[in-house]
Image: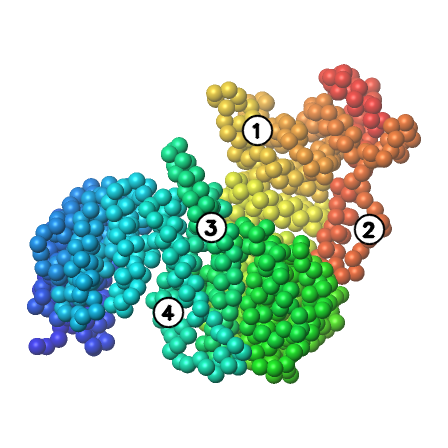
């Protein structure tokens, strides 16, 4: 039969069942061209009515090849996620849904192929998650009825498979309603399944030990599947499992069966299911676990099993003997853990859950009613009095240390055979502790040590002191005890002089030679990493130990020892107690060893961990890293090239470069040749690396600008790449705005040049309107504009400020700003039920007004022109529709004065006072709208000048100089300069000392401005008669008391 390939567009192929089957043939063929065309056609049909109904028909047709039916059911399953929801675009029609649902259960029961049956069960479960019980009320009852009926074993198995996946879907649904629907159906299902489980076990259990025939094997599979469903239903289908008889019956049966199942290899899977049920009950329903029948005895039985397994878990004798005696496939070194080990792990998990029941009740129990609290009290009493007795706690602690902390012989052999892989696996086990016996044992030990400190501390210390002597040669036992002391550091630190232990014991032991002492060297590195943040006063011996452990010359410092030391050193150096001068003597040797080790290891994850250690060292050492910077940078290009598509490595390299730049300050300029192309490649819009490296590249870019003493052309060429980043939002926007501010400090002439200034202002203006509800981001944009105005004034005086103001009007920035302020003025004029919400308020309004203030201080004429050009159309007092400066300033000054009392920062209040006072320098005909607010001006002057007076000046001082004091006027000569400060710190300090807020004394400024205003109005008498007469007497008295007039 010739193959069918589709060569025409999908819309030219009307969908029918025969055509779909031929298309599935094409998509499932081995011809790449047919696969491509068939797959494309299936994708085009996804949104066509009847497509999923026909897919189900193809799956049900047993005459078709299995691979074609498999493709059909997979397509159907994938389509449910996309198009089954009623709200989905091109959702499956109601008629098609009805047709598909009507055939789901029957097709599942009759499916003979296991793989196809599984996929169909997943389809049933996905649809049930959407439609049970509203649109598919019999989804569960139909399967339960099948389980009640006398049907062939295959149909029973298929019904259980479908039921299992429905329960999985409903129990993990995010909607509470889905879980409640499952809980409503649970009791009936549990009753049916428990009967099925009990009867099937009763059938095959007596036949164990004999040859297992087909019927017995089928019955055992049935029991296993029934228990899988029961386990999930009992955990997720009940709020209080212990209150239901059917659960109590199942729980009792599992305890009776567990011991029998452990004796036969054929029933190991079923035994593991029972263990999972017991563990999940203890974790999810702690009170129910303790109150269900014989649970205390069950937990003790698990401890007995775990302890017995511990006898064979750890290696015995010397390391050399353990390694030589280990055989492949024994000692738990196979890929699959033994059933006994899995059960022992469950035992530890159950006991850890019991400890949490007793000692972490707030995180364990959920109280909803008085009966819940009563059950919690009863459960904790049972655990305390009958399970976690002092004897058992001591027994558990001893067993954990002596059996489960000891390396297995296979571990030691793998250490030698695959050192890097072994080290990585051991490092990662802490995160996956629920799946590792040793890691779980460590977690349980720590819980016991914390909660039974008084009981365990002295016995633990006695054992520790017995082995913590250079004379003790039992390396494996010493390693396990040191493991315990490391874990229990937060508990025993007050009783153990760890500095003396380092000085008298560890320094000697790390230098010991002989078979197996590399095990202890690895443990010493981990132990120091655990204790460094707890109590280590003398750091120099610690650094010397790590310097020794990283040395490749000693054969006992094998790769595992050195990599472990490299990882742990980052914890040591990153601790707050690290002093650079103490680490400096060992720095050269440590860095050389780490860089050689990075070159030696092969795994990317290991290289990154060691690179992170170097990065932490760079950050901690600051300028002292300079002598080693060239060597560190020299290894990075090779790592960058070797990383290929491994973007995590590239991120780590960007991080260390940023830290190097920050550490070296101005001396980092030689790194620019390497760093700038990397930044450009990572931030170019649409580049392959932008999604992965943008954030780290921005950090590096920001660091480079902060530490650059003078701009290079290559640095300035990056500026246009900033503007697209403004559209990203979130953290990228914040960092881009920081970089923009740094550029304004570093190269103001370039940023305010005719080629850069307009696009910069346009980009900021597009941001400005959208950030009213984000005070922090809005403040950053306003600060940049404020800085631009100040830099323009420094570079070109009033003329440059006028040009800047004109540009801000042209891009729409100032119109948006004044529109926001006018909206606030309008809102503040409304009260009561008709009150309007102010569009800008609080710190956002302060930032807006700060820009207005900077324009006034920079150029009064430029400010006036900008306001007239950009002010909203506000009717003047004469009622005309024409905007005038006076008409705008009337409402602006009202809003400004009313907002002053909401400004808490003295510097900002003084800035506003300077700008409002400067308005008195307007031409005489324009002064009138300012003097009309003379009472507000005097109130402001009184408040701000009083606030700024130096508190150290005594009240009785009467000299004019003292009374005109201003605590915000700084003297640059008095500033102490850090010799290692960043160049940008110097630039910011220069800007601060040139700021009018810190150079102009407000009392004198007011005196001069008011004097000119008085003279302009015809002298003091005319001024009093025209303006002062309207000022409140108390306000005037307070102002005159300042002595500034």
Which of the two labelled residues, at mark 3 and mark 2, occupies the earlier sequence position?
Answer: 3
Camera-side mark, 3 or 2: 3
How much space separates mark 1 and mark 2, taking CA atoms?
A: 42 Å
- Disc 3 target residue: 388
Please count the marks in the image. 4
On the picture, is 713 further left or further right than 46? right
The front one of 979 and 856 is 979
Residue 169 - label: none
Q: Position of residue 477 (x, y in %)?
A: 56, 70
Which of the two labelled residues, at mark 3 and mark 4, occupies the earlier sequence position?
Answer: 4
Which of the two labelled residues, at mark 1 and mark 3, occupies the earlier sequence position?
Answer: 3
On the picture, is 859 further left or further right than 1039? left
Which of the two labelled residues, at mark 4 and mark 2, occupies the earlier sequence position?
Answer: 4
Q: Tell me if mark 3 has few (under 14), some (14-19) or many (20+) residues whose alpha carbon lies within 10 angstroms of its own.
A: some
Q: Element at badge 2?
A: loop
Residue 825 - label: 1
Q: Tell me if mark 1 has few (under 14), some (14-19) or many (20+) residues whose alpha carbon lies within 10 angstroms of its own.
A: many
- Disc 2 target residue: 975
Q: What residue is at 56 percent from the left and 62 percent from the top?
A: 484
Residue 92 vertical placement versus 769 (above, below):
below
Camera-side mark, 3 or 4: 3
Q: What residue is at 63 percent from the left and 81 percent from the top?
A: 513
How much space separates mark 3 and mark 2, taking CA atoms?
A: 65 Å
Q: Element at badge 3?
A: loop
Q: Position of residue 993 (x, y in %)?
A: 78, 48
Q: Element at badge 1?
A: helix
How much space separates mark 1 and mark 3, taking CA atoms?
A: 69 Å
The front one of 143 and 362 is 362
Residue 27 vertical placement versus 100 (above, below):
below
Q: Give residue 245's quadrant in the image.
A: top left
Camera-side mark, 1 or 2: 2
- Disc 4 target residue: 337
């Amino acid at each position: 039969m010739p193959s069918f390939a589709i060569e025409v567009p999908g819309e030219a192929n009307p969908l029918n069942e025969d055509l779909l089957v031929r298309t599935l043939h094409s998509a499932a063929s081995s011809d790449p061209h047919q696969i491509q065309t068939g797959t494309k056609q299936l994708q085009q049909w996804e949104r066509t009515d009847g497509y999923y109904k026909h897919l189900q028909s193809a799956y049900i047709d047993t005459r078709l090849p299995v691979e074609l039916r498999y493709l059909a059911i997979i397509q159907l399953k994938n389509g449910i996620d996309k198009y089954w929801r009623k709200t989905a675009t091109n959702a499956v029609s109601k008629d098609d849904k009805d047709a598909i649902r009507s055939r789901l259960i029957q097709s599942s029961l009759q499916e003979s192929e296991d793989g196809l049956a599984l996929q169909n069960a997943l389809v049933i479960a996905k649809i049930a998650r959407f439609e049970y019980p509203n649109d598919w009320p019999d989804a569960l009852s139909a399967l339960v009825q099948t389980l009640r009926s006398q049907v062939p074993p295959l149909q029973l198995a298929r019904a259980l498979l479908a039921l299992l996946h429905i329960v999985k879907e409903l129990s993990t649904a995010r909607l509470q309603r889905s879980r409640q629907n499952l809980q409503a159906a649970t009791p009936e299902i549990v009753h049916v399944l428990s009967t099925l489980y009990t009867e099937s076990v009763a059938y095959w259990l007596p036949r164990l030990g004999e040859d297992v025939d087909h019927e017995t094997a089928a019955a055992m599979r049935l029991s296993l599947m029934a228990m899988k469903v029961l386990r999930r239903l009992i955990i997720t289908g009940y709020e209080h499992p212990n209150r239901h008889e059917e659960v109590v019956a199942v729980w009792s049966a599992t305890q009776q069966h567990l011991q029998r199942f452990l004796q036969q290899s054929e029933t190991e899977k079923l035994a593991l299911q029972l263990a999972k049920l017991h563990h999940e009950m203890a974790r999810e329903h702690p009170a129910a676990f303790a109150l269900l029948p014989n649970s205390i005895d069950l937990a003790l039985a698990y401890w007995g099993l775990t302890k017995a397994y511990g006898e064979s878990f750890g290696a015995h004798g010397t390391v050399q003997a353990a390694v030589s005696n280990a055989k492949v496939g024994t000692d738990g070194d196979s890929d699959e853990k033994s059933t006994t080990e899995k059960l022992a792990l469950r035992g530890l998990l159950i006991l850890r859950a019991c400890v949490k029941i007793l000692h972490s009740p707030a995180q364990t129990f959920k109280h909803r009613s008085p009966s819940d609290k009563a059950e919690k009290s009863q459960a904790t009493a049972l655990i305390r009095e009958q399970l976690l007795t002092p004897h058992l706690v001591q027994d558990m602690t001893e067993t954990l240390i002596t059996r489960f902390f000891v390396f297995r012989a296979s571990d030691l052999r793998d250490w030698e055979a695959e050192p890097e892989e072994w080290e990585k696996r051991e490092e990662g086990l802490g995160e996956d502790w629920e799946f590792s016996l040793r890691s779980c044992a460590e977690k349980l030990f720590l819980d016991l040590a914390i909660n039974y400190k008084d009981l365990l501390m002295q016995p633990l210390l006695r054992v520790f002191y017995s082995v913590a002597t250079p004379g003790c040669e039992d390396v494996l036992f010493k390693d396990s005890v040191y493991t315990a002391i490391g874990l229990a550091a937060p508990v025993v630190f007050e009783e153990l002089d760890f500095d003396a232990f380092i000085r008298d014991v560890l320094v000697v032991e790390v230098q010991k030679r002989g078979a197996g002492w590399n095990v202890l060297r690895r443990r010493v590195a981990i132990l120091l990493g655990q204790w460094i943040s707890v109590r280590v006063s003398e750091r120099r011996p610690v650094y010397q130990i790590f310097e020794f452990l990283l040395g490749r010359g000693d054969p006992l410092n094998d790769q595992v020892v050195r990599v472990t030391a490299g990882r742990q050193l980052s914890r040591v150096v990153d601790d707050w107690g690290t002093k650079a001068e103490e680490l400096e003597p060992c720095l050269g040797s440590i860095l050389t060893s780490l860089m050689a080790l990075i070159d030696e290891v092969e795994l990317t994850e290991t290289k990154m961990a060691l690179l992170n250690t170097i990065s932490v060292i760079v950050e901690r050492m600051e300028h002292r890293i300079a002598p080693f910077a060239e060597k560190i940078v020299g290894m990075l290009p090779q790592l960058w090239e070797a990383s290929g598509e491994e973007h995590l490595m590239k991120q780590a390299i960007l991080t260390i470069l940023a830290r190097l730049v920050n550490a070296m300050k101005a001396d980092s300029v030689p790194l620019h040749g390497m760093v700038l192309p990397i930044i450009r490649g990572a931030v170019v819009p649409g580049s392959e690396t932008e999604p992965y490296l943008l954030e780290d590249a921005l950090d590096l870019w920001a660091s480079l600008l902060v530490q650059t003493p003078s701009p290079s052309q290559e640095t300035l060429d990056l500026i246009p790449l900033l503007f697209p980043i403004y559209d990203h939002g979130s953290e990228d926007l914040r960092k881009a705005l920081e970089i923009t501010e740094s550029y304004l400090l570093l190269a103001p002439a370039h940023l305010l040049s005719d080629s850069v200034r307009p696009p910069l202002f346009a980009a900021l203006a597009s941001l400005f309107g959208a950030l009213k509800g984000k005070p922090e981001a809005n403040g950053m944009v306003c600060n940049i504009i404020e800085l631009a105005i100040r830099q323009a004034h420094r570079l070109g005086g009033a003329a440059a400020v006028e040009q800047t103001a004109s540009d801000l009007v042209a891009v729409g920035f100032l119109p948006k700003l004044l529109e926001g302020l006018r909206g606030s003025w309008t809102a503040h004029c409304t009260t009561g039920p008709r009150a309007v919400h102010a569009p800008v308020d609080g710190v956002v309004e302060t930032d807006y007004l700060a820009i207005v203030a900077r324009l006034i201080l920079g150029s009064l004429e430029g400010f006036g022109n900008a306001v007239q050009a950009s002010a909203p159309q506000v009717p003047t007092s004469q009622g005309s529709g024409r905007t005038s400066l006076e008409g705008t300033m009337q409402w602006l000054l009202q809003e400004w004065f009313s907002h002053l009392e909401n400004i808490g920062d003295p510097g900002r209040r003084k800035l506003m006072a300077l700008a409002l006072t400067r308005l008195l320098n307007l031409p005489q005909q324009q002064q009138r709208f300012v003097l009309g607010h003379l009472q507000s001006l005097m109130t402001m002057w009184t408040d701000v000048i009083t606030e700024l007076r130096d508190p150290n000046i005594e009240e009785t001082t009467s000299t004019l100089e003292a009374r005109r004091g201003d605590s915000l006027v700084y003297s640059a000569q008095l500033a102490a300069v850090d010799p290692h400060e960043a160049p940008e710190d110097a630039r910011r300090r220069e800007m601060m000392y040139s700021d009018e807020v810190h150079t102009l004394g407000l009392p004198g400024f007011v005196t001069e401005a008011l004097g000119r205003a008085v003279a302009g109005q015809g002298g003091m008498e005319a001024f009093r008669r025209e303006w002062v007469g309207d000022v409140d007497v108390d306000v005037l008295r307070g102002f005159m008391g300042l002595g500034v007039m």
